[in-house]
Amino acid sequence: MPTIVHAADLHVDSPLAGLDRYEGAPVDVLRHATRKAFARLVAFAIAERADLLLLAGDLFDGTWRDFGTGLFFAKELAKLRDVGTKVIFVRGNHDAESVVTTSLRFADHVSELSTTGPETRLFPDLGVAVHGQGYRMRATRDDLAHGFPQRHAGLFNVGLLHTSLDGRPRHEPYAPSRLPTLLDKGYDYWALGHVHTREVVHEAPFVVFPGNLQGRHVHEQGAKGATKILVDSKGSATISHHPLDVVRWDHLRISLDDAANVDDVLERATLALDEAITRADGRPLATRVTIAGAAREGSSLSRDPRRVEDAVRLFVASEHGARVFVEKIVVAPTTRATAASVALTVTPAELDDERLALAADLEELERKMPTFARSRFHDLRDELLSSAMARAEVEVSTATGSVEEADEP
Ligand SMILES: [Mn+2]
């Protein structure tokens, strides 16, 4: 019975945000991380003797900078032909037909499902039917799943779709679909893409977002990879997740509370870093460092955040320069007095409302932009939103932790 590998959101040749011009970094590791992760996916499919590789959209990050992107992709996929692994993919919002216009011609072990209507591809020798539809335009607001056909009796039925499903937070509402619509088709497995965080939305039948293959910025932390599906002789599936990322993202939060000097901060940074390096499991680590809290009274730490930042940067470079890359250091010293006043004016729930309102404003702005500017702004939007909120979150979390001490001078 077939072994199937499901991946999505490869975003091949997407830069790692904030690290693309990193001083002294091995260019190969950071600039080619998404390529290398894709190469690991291909190697994984070969090692697992996969019969079929499903790619659920956003194979590419956008228009190719040059032909090298497509060439690399085609060469990797060619390795799968040699071992008899078939590949089937749909386009997502990032590689919609209107965005990646260079025509992709692959050997006959690779097939793309139509962007004009739902299409079914049968693999009779595997006992598998794959139903799907890709994106013609970037902003697809239709429920594509609605038009998918019912299951083919006697086969293992897969739905292949790039969708925001019921409006996942922090994701564009492209090709919105509803879980009941998916379940209603009677398929055995829904291979979804678009949401970059791995999520098993439903079991029996499985509805799965494998997440992206390689984190691309600080909000895509933790293990990234693909899902393996084993189908038994009765047609039921078991799944497992396999990390394939080559650089691991993290966010270290270091407390300034009661720190007297830079050495105190570095001691805490050492502990936090060691834990993150362990979590990264042998991979290079890309991380943001947030240092926040109320330093000991009289200490110069709160007056000179720049000195704290420089000390931490130097420390990381000298201790772990070859494998830890600091994306950004945020030093946010608070005093008990300011912490208390923030606590009185803002709660985490209110902060969340603020975030939603800001997100709505930015989306409105994007809608009003001319088409050529929209895609550039779109990529910037998440980053704008998160940097605006990062500092506010630091202040609120510090504040809520210090409420009891609000009466102190
Ligand atoms: Mn994506």
Image: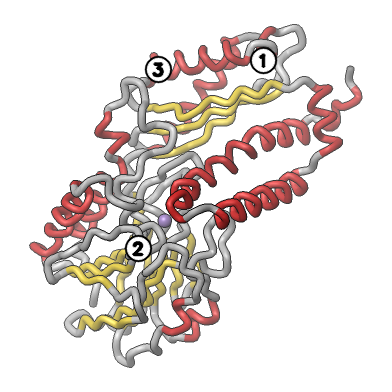
> Marks 3/1: CA distance?
22 Å
40 to the left or right of 362: left
Cβ atoms at labels 3 and 1 below 8 Å apart: no
Q: Secondary structure at mark 3?
A: helix
Residue 88 position in % (x across, y down): 25, 70
Out of 145 and 337, give the one closest to the viewer: 145
Q: Amino acid at mark 2?
A: Ser
Mark seen at residue 259? 1
Out of 284 and 219, give the one closest to the viewer: 219
Residue 217 position in % (x across, y down): 45, 41
Q: Earlier in the sequence, mark 2 or mark 3?
A: 2
Q: Residue at x 52, y 24 (%)?
A: 271
Mark seen at residue 98? 2
Residue tagged 3: 317
Residue 237 seen from this side: no
343 to the left or right of 377: right
